């Protein structure tokens, strides 16, 4: 059995970077967005850049519950995170998250509509294919 640690979660998120965000969990069909991870902070929150008028932002206004999936098939593991998404439009936080790699993303959008999504992890499932098992962690308590 593989022991799942905070470092497994952090390493997976930082290594993979791209996450699938699933919103509208209580509705059919749910909505899926591909987001690039900008930060995994010390409180266990995951940060993304988004657009005020994007579908995922609009979905989070209806229901803030969402699922994030990080997958690396060649290593045979995945991380599924359930939690709550919050839209943040704080200029200081946006400046902190934004970097030169985001120029292409931002050019497609109006600068005034740039927002961040803060994802608070409530539950994490880590699949270890080597041992063919899923480990569940309630990370809110675990990460503190």
Image: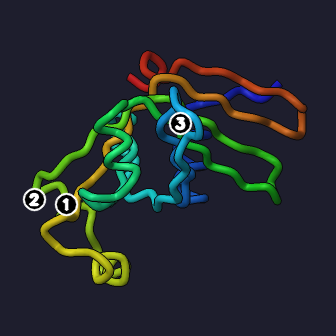
* Residue 131 percent location from the top left of the image: 89, 32
Kindly report the distance in space between the C-alpha atoms of the residues bearing marks 2 and 3.
Answer: 26 Å
Q: Tell me whether the residue at label 1 lies in contact with that at label 3, contact meaning CB atoms closer than 8 angstroms.
A: no
Residue designated by label 3: 67
Instruction: Decide if residue 123 is on the left or right side of residue 108.
Output: right
Question: Residue shown at 17%/73% (left/top)?
Answer: 111
Residue designated by label 2: 91
Kindly report the distance in space between the C-alpha atoms of the residues bearing marks 1 and 3.
Answer: 22 Å
Question: Residue shown at 61%/40% (left/top)?
Answer: 8
Number of other residues with Cα within 10 Å of mark 2, as a class: few under 14, some 14 to 19, many 20 or more: few
Number of other residues with Cα within 10 Å of mark 3, as a class: few under 14, some 14 to 19, many 20 or more: many
Please name which of the two marks, 1 or 3, marks the residue nearer to the observer. Answer: 3
Q: Secondary structure at mark 2?
A: helix
* Quadrant assignment for the N terminus: top right
- Taking 19 as reference, is 79 above or below it? above
Colour pattern of the rendering? rainbow
* Residue 86 percent location from the top left of the image: 28, 38
- Taking 106 as reference, is 22 above or below it? above
Q: Earlier in the sequence, mark 2 or mark 3?
A: 3
Q: Tell me whether the residue at label 1 lies in contact with that at label 2, contact meaning CB atoms closer than 8 angstroms.
A: yes
Please name which of the two marks, 2 or 3, marks the residue nearer to the observer. Answer: 3
Q: Secondary structure at mark 1?
A: helix
| Nearest the eye: 77 or 8 | 77
* Quadrant assignment for the C terminus: top left
- Taking 122 as reference, is 127 above or below it? below
Residue designated by label 1: 94
Kindly report the distance in space between the C-alpha atoms of the residues bearing marks 1 and 2.
Answer: 5 Å
Q: Earlier in the sequence, mark 1 or mark 3?
A: 3
Number of other residues with Cα within 10 Å of mark 1, as a class: few under 14, some 14 to 19, many 20 or more: some
Quarter of the figure with residue 72: bottom right
Question: Residue shown at 36%/83% (left/top)?
Answer: 104
| Nearest the eye: 33 or 90 | 33
């Amino acid at each position: 059995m593989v022991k799942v640690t905070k470092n497994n979660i952090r390493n997976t998120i930082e290594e993979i970077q791209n996450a699938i965000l699933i919103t509208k969990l209580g509705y059919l069909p749910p909505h899926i967005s591909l987001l690039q991870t900008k930060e995994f902070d010390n409180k266990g929150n995951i940060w993304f850049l988004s657009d005020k008028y994007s579908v995922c932002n609009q979905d989070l206004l209806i229901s803030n519950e969402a699922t994030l999936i990080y997958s690396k098939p060649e290593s045979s593991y995945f991380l599924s995170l359930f939690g709550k998404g919050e839209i943040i439009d704080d200029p200081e936080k946006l400046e902190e998250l934004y970097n030169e790699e985001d120029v292409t993303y931002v050019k497609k959008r109006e600068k005034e509509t740039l927002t961040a999504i803060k994802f608070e992890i409530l539950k994490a499932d880590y699949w270890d294919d080597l041992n063919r098992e899923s480990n569940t962690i309630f990370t809110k308590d675990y990460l503190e």
